[in-house]
Image (cartoon, rainbow, N blue to C red):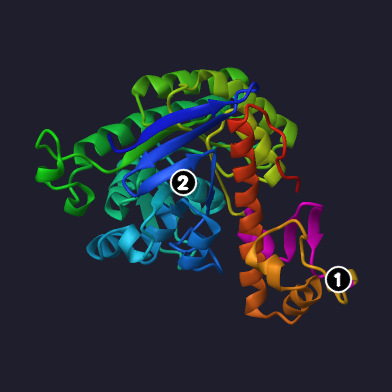
Amino acid sequence: MSIGFDIAGRSAAGGRAGRLRTPHGDVETPVFMPVGTVATVKSVAQDVLEELGVQLLLSNTYHLYLRPGHELVRRLGGLHRFMAWPHAILTDSGGYQVFSLGDLRKVTEDGVDFRSHLDGSAHFFTPERAMEIQIALGADIVMAFDECTEHPAERPRAQASMEMTLRWAKRCKDYFEAHQLEVPWQVPSNENSVDGTRHSTQALFGIIQGGMHADLRRESAERTVAMGFDGYAIGGLSVGEPPELTDEVVAATLPHLPADKPRYLMGVGYPDQIAKYAGMGIDMFDCVLPTRAARHGLLFTSEGRIQIKNARFARDPEPLDPKCRCKVCARYSRAYLRHLYSANEGLAAVLNSIHNLAFYLDTIRSVRHSIGLGDMAGSHSG
């Protein structure tokens, strides 16, 4: 098995505390994955991520394909070695990024024609190509190539998109199973294999689509699960829908996902949302918000969100969050953080990002602990 998943505890509301076993280490769940889109979490070095307790990072197929190129990463020993990160990695297939290109893309049954946001050059992604790139990158968990449905989307559009995602999922799985052993450094040597055969070190997750329609989400889940993936992601959310609708879609989808497989909610969200959905039974989360908000001076604290550029912090000697144990709050004042941001110093993005990531990781640790106790007390606000 390329990954394993064990559930150690549950809450009354359905939350699960577990362990995801990967070739690059065990990951305690529920887990928050910082987004390292181009093999870097913006403004935060890998040793700092380790200090923060990051167990699993996300990188992106689309961006790494364009720059520096998956073949270069493969020749340099894969993504783990390339970015000097010996822990677990998940790669997003690029479906959401292609969706975000708008007029720069054209979707057909075969795949997606698109133009690079970097230089306008023409490219073509198929489900098979997305798998080929992710196999070369060598992440522990790879994602099927899906079509992310826009919001709002009328039912016929959402259904057609869901059907295409299901057909693409089958193509991804077929290609993955046929080619996953082609990169030698991804598989253990025969003497380390119990039965003398080569085993892939990569796992493939399927993605549930269906827009904001509960019955389509159910159908997508049931048909995707029938294909037999290593884990299942709920995609197509955080695309502009109101939070109440996100709640409804998650609640409608979860009962149709296997209890013994990891469940991943893609691209969501704020700390309070993560705590809520973890309490409902989601195991994995990612979001660019901690570092993106940090670069714009928006910081998460136990007392709510703070915009550090506000004048009221100019003479404030207190730490950013008195309840936070991160090294930023232990050393620097709000006044200093405001000064760095106002002066457009690069250190502002570094310190702000470290704190926001620490807050998110503390949030998920608190939720994990609460689930282990059988309740959901003590989760963070923000």
**Side of 175 where 340 appears, left or right:** right
Report the magenta residues as a range. Answer: 289-311
Q: Residue at x 74, y 31 (%)?
A: 244
Numbered disc in front, either 1 or 2? 1
The quarter of the image holding the N terminus is top left
For residue 173, above or below residue 201: above
Residue ranking furthest to the front = 373
103 or 22: which is nearer to us?
A: 22
Residue 269 in percent (x, y) is at 65, 45
Residue 255 in percent (x, y) is at 55, 18
Does the magenta-highlighted stretch encompass residue 291? Answer: yes
Number of the label disc, if any, that sits on residue 171: none
> Which residue is identified by label 2?
106
Number of the label disc, if any, that sits on residue 313: 1
The first of marks 1 and 2 along the sequence is: 2
Residue 231 in percent (x, y) is at 41, 32
